Amino acid sequence: MCNPILKIKEIRVLVSILAAFVIGIFGASPFVSAATQDQDSILPSVIVRGLELYPSTPASAQRLLDRLSEAALEVCGGSAFSLREVKVAIKASSCWRDALSDAIRRIDSPQLTLAFERAKGPRAPV
């Protein structure tokens, strides 16, 4: 059973992560010339499936944050199999920060925002 509203939210999260990646790499200039084009056709993509977009508990919010963090890592050039040093460098980049924070802002879940704020404390999620 696939809820079409959740699919739309998944796509919006994906597009926001991808847009932050492209802006981080190339600046805003590709968007000026491609403003009338379908942005899905010009952006690299990472599909994240099975998201609980509105977590009701801190544990489910943390799971969602971890999944979004991994998606942002992949969009910014890493993977789950990257060396730890590579992951740390990517997670210190504006690409990763912008992609993750934009996805969290678009989801607009208080539990997710709280989990993100806690993770930003002493260290970011690895």
Image (cartoon, grey):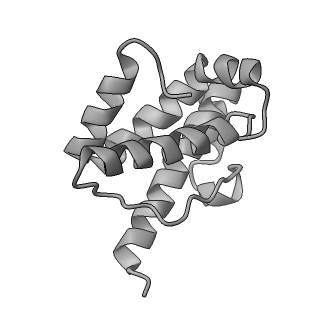
Q: Which residue is drawn at 30% across and 42% down?
A: 112
Residue 2 location (% of width, % of height): 44, 83
Residue 43 location (% of width, % of height): 68, 49
- Vertical order, 99 against 68 (above or below): above
- Closer to us: 61 or 107: 61
In this rendering, would 58 be left or right of 92? left
- Vertical order, 36 against 5 (above or below): above
Q: In which quarter of the image is residue 83?
A: top right
Residue 106 location (% of width, % of height): 35, 47
Res. 21 in view:
yes
Q: In which quarter of the image is residue 80?
A: top right
In this rendering, would 84 be left or right of 55? right
Q: Residue at x 49, y 66 (%)?
A: 50
Q: Which residue is drawn at 70% across and 28% down?
A: 26
Residue 93 location (% of width, % of height): 61, 18
- Closer to us: 27 or 122: 122
- Vertical order, 93 against 49 (above or below): above
Q: Quadrant of residue 49?
A: bottom right
Res. 32 in view:
no
Q: Quadrant of the C terminus?
A: top right
